[in-house]
Amino acid sequence: MSKLVPPHGGKGLVIRLLAGAEREAELKKAAGLKKIQITSQEKGDLIMIGIGGFSPLDGFMTKADWKSVCENMTLANGTFWPIPVMLSCTKEDADGIKVGDEVALERNGLMMATIKVSEKFELSDADKAWESEKIYKGAGDDSQGDFLAKAKAEHPGVQMVFNRKPCYLAGQVKVLSEGDFPEKFPGVYKTPAQLRAEMDEHGWRNVAALQLRNPMHRSHEYLCKIAVEVMDGVVIHSLVGALKPGDIPAEVRVKCIDTLVKKYFVEKNVIQAGYPLDMRYAGPREALLHATFRQNYGMNYLIVGRDHAGVGDFYGMFEAQTIFDTIPQSKEPGKALLTQPLKIDWTFYCFKCDGMASLRTCPHSKEDRVILSGTKLRKMLSENAPVPDHFGREEVLDILREYYASLTEKVEIKMQKAAAGSSMK
């Protein structure tokens, strides 16, 4: 019997991905249904529902769930959930759909799923503004109109909310495809069931996830090695869905991680895996989502360092850690989040310590430290600037330099306080 943390929601892995004859029959039926074109974010969410990564969700959320998630961080039935999972459509499409109808969901010509519509509803721009403030606004931000104006201009997650269509469909889905993830990332893209089986084979019980959307620099490596020392194993679990312009694509990151693991880790203690979501850049709320689906993948700890899932200067440096202290609890089985944060302070290379350290272990001054961040690394590489000693492993930097040299168009990388280290004590 598996000793890993049970899936979230108390129902085991809720898998809505069809296979074999059942899938073929549903595909045939879907060809005759009304078709809705879905976004990249909706595609990633749909696949996660299909493979059980979003257990206990079996489809897209109702308006009551949306409101409760935004306001209380729970579904309408009280089960913990931190971020809405929504399916939007045009008013024209919604007018042609009745509750009880089955609708096909497509992405770029690929039949992704069918949904049996249990509810349709609208969200106004005022509703989207309210959602944005609840989900994307930092705890230390006292502004209201100012936040929204800035976020609509600069925050990719808030922009995604306002770019959603005005009408919404809720209901149970039958997922027909995992997209191109299995073929594009063989051996890396793993479903929760596959990753759980692999960890069971290792005999792991206490497992930490390292969330990645950037190539691993020395700080990521250090965070991972701290966890390896105290856990049965660590999963370097990187996002292989869509990112904002200027971020490094998944196939490059996977190559970097693979190189680093082979050369600088005891391989039997580390698994590299990928999951199919797009980033929302929701900072603290996204850290909670990362912990929620990591529970479904079998990991009972999530490494949470500085500015986890942040963007720009929207969040406090350790707000993604402190939010775990405020989430709703429940005595009902399955309804509370079980995966816990492994909270780690600022990390950096210190010349006087002659190694990686953190604010908890290094007594020296800021001038003695190499401040590490993915944004800072991307900026240096995109500008063909020299990378300081001890910032990254040379084998990884070689891969990244080759990638940047291949680009025909450059994207300006903006430095925020977190990346520059200006808020370090």
Image (tube, rainbow, N blue to C red):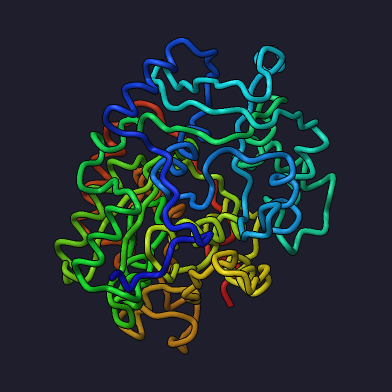
Image position, residue 139 (x, y; %): 73, 62
Image: 116 above or below 52: above
The residue sitting at 40% across, 69% down in the picture is 5
Image: 157 above or below 227: above
Q: Nearer the viewer, residue 135 or 388?
A: 135
Image position, residue 304 (x, y; %): 49, 68
Q: Nearer the viewer, residue 343 or 124?
A: 124
Q: Is residue 383 visible?
A: no
Q: Nearer the viewer, residue 294 or 15?
A: 15
Image position, residue 334 (x, y; %): 54, 65
Q: Nearer the viewer, residue 72 or 25?
A: 25
Give the side of residue 151 with respect to residue 113, left or right: right
Quadrant where the C terminus sits is bottom right
Q: Quadrant of residue 225?
A: bottom left
Q: Is residue 207 visible?
A: yes
Image: 345 above or below 109: below
The residue sitting at 64% across, 29% down in the picture is 169
Give the side of residue 399 with respect to residue 299, left or right: left
Give the side of residue 340 with respect to residue 157, left or right: left
